[in-house]
Image: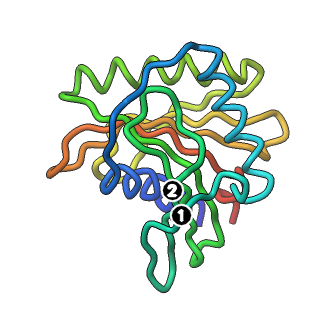
Amino acid sequence: MKSLLLAVLLSAAAGIAAWVHGSPQLQHRDDTSAAITRYVSAEDNDFADLKGKLQRSNSSSAYFASLQALPGSNACVIYVNDDAGAHFGGCTFDAANLNDAGALYRRWLENVKSAVPQWRRIDLTRMPPGDVAATIFTDASQVHMIVVDIFNDPQLGYRVDTTFSKASVLRS
């Protein structure tokens, strides 16, 4: 069950990357930490305070525009998966190639660590197809979680995703 839910989590990140595009905006590191903290806080109410306009939906899931961007992201959304009973907040960052994706990935690992320095870091070694690298950060009580991953979409290319969720999504 844990591997299925992890796949749902990473699929949510890939799904976010598959349909969102926009213009990155450069901001200061303080803005980055504040945005990360806002997403973490929003996990407690299933991202209700960040949920913007409905973008698309089907019988089991829905994508909403997020009211909070992460600096430099192409777009951010709130994703609801009714089948898994899970809510995710996520932002995607386009990368021209694997080297650029790796640099973005490392920068976002540092951004998350800077925003929540006391959290535990877990580098994943087994991932669904398409994921190149993934790291989970979780708080000491394992309530909150942030996943940073590199995803390679055959049609859209490389993306770095930063996905926020309650850690309970990984529990069976």
Instruction: Name which residue type carries label 1.
Output: Lys
- In the rendered view, how is the structure colored? rainbow
Task: Using residue 99 as the reference point, say whether residue 35 is left or right of it.
Answer: right
The residue that appears at 72% across and 40% down in the rendered structure is: 40
Q: Is residue 40 above or below residue 3?
A: above
Q: Residue 110 location in percent, x, y? A: 55, 16
Q: Is residue 108 above or below residue 161?
A: above
Please state which of residues 114 and 57 is positioned toward the viewer in this rendering.
57
Task: Using residue 51 as the reference point, say whether residue 60 is left or right of it.
Answer: left
Task: Using residue 63 as the reference point, say whether residue 29 is left or right of it.
Answer: right
The residue that mark 2 highlights is 65
The mark found on residue 53 in the picture is 1
Please state which of residues 112 and 20 is positioned toward the viewer in this rendering.
20
Q: Residue 43 location in percent, x, y? A: 73, 50
How packed mark 1 is, by other alpha carbons closer than 10 Å (few <14, some 14-19, many 20 or more), is: few
The furthest residue to the bottom: 59
Instruction: Compare marks 2 and 1 and give the one earlier in the sequence.
Output: 1
Task: Using residue 100 as the reference point, say whether residue 42 is left or right of it.
Answer: right
Please report contact status of discs 2 and 1: CB closer than 8 Å, yes or no.
Answer: yes
The residue that appears at 64% across and 65% down in the rendered structure is: 86
Q: Is residue 47 above or below residue 151?
A: below
How packed mark 2 is, by other alpha carbons closer than 10 Å (few <14, some 14-19, many 20 or more), is: many
Quadrant location of the C terminus in the rendered image: bottom right
The residue that appears at 23% across and 49% down in the rendered structure is: 153
User: Label 2, label 1: how many angstroms apart (C-alpha)?
Assistant: 5 Å
